[in-house]
């Protein structure tokens, strides 16, 4: 089944404790992206990647890191999480960087930082 | 820069009634427009998209949207609501040459029996 998977689905952590949220897609998509969803703000892009070893900042990159060492994986790293990073996070992928492409979303990771 | 505005954070309808979710966009060039739906505890999935072909776009589950350049709108409609349509709906815009997808703030659709 074609899908985007994220792990973990739920995570509660404490301020300053490094964490990684994994994202993997099995559709051989070139483009991958991370969003955060907050009430009243919709989805905002954190980082995106147009291909292996090519990443760039989105609208809200502060406090986050990403890497794209393999085409299928695009982990999101929070080196020192803070409470303002409590949010619902989505990974998405699309065939390539065409702006008309459909993005396929993972199920989401709900992160709480205490 | 492109943007979308969704009017109404919550819309309530009765089962069988018309669904109308409003989206207005701003873009300096002809845009691509999308509607995504998010069911409870799930990721977003594409309902439909406009990519400069027909202005009336039909999507899944009986939804459709019409691109109106003169009104800069892309409203989502469905003739008859089902209980299963209860979800959050996001309008989004992108422009040719840039993969960046900009989302609206979402509209939660509530369907009552």
Image (cartoon, coloured by chain):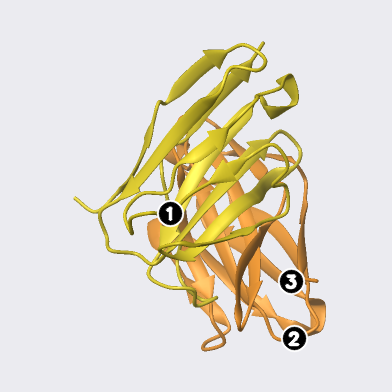
Chain colours: A yellow, B orange
Nearer to us of marks 3 and 1 is 1
Residue A107 visible, this orientation? no
Which residue is identified by label 3? B73
Identify the mark at residue A68; answer none if there is no mark: 1
Looking at the image, which residue is at 67% across and 65% down?
A: B75
Q: Please tell me whether mark 3 sits on a helix, a strand or a loop.
A: strand
Residue B36 pos. (x, y %): 53, 55
Which residue is identified by label 2? B29
Residue A89 visible, this orientation? yes
Q: Is A93 or A65 nearer to us in this picture?
A: A65
Dot 2: few (<14), some (14–19), or many (≥20) neighbours within 10 Å?
A: few
Of mark 3 and mark 2, the one earlier in the sequence is 2
Using the rendered image, report if marks 3 and 1 lie on a common chain: no
Looking at the image, which residue is at 69% across and 45% down?
A: A42
Left or right: A72 in relation to A15:
left
Q: CA distance from mark 3 to mark 1?
A: 37 Å
């Amino acid at each position: 089944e074609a899908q985007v998977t994220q792990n973990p689905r739920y995570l509660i952590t404490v301020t300053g404790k490094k964490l990684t949220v994994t994202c993997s897609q099995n559709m051989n998509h070139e483009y991958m992206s991370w969003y955060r969803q907050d009430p009243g703000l919709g989805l905002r892009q954190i980082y995106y990647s147009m291909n292996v070893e090519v990443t760039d900042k989105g609208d809200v990159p502060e406090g986050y890191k990403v890497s794209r060492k393999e085409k299928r994986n695009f982990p999101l790293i929070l080196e020192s999480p803070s409470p303002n990073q409590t949010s619902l996070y989505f990974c998405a992928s699309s065939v390539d960087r065409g702006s008309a492409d459909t993005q396929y979303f993972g199920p989401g990771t709900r992160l709480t930082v205490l | 820069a492109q943007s979308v505005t969704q009017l109404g954070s919550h819309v309530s309808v009765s089962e069988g009634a018309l669904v109308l979710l409003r989206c207005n966009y701003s873009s300096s060039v002809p845009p691509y427009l999308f509607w995504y739906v998010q069911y409870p505890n799930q990721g977003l999935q594409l309902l439909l998209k406009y990519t400069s072909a027909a202005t009336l776009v039909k999507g899944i589950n009986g939804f459709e949207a019409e691109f109106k350049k003169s009104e800069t709108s892309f409203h989502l409609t469905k003739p008859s609501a089902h209980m299963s349509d209860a979800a959050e709906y996001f309008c989004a815009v992108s422009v040719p040459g840039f993969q960046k997808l900009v989302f609206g703030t979402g509209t939660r659709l509530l369907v009552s029996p």
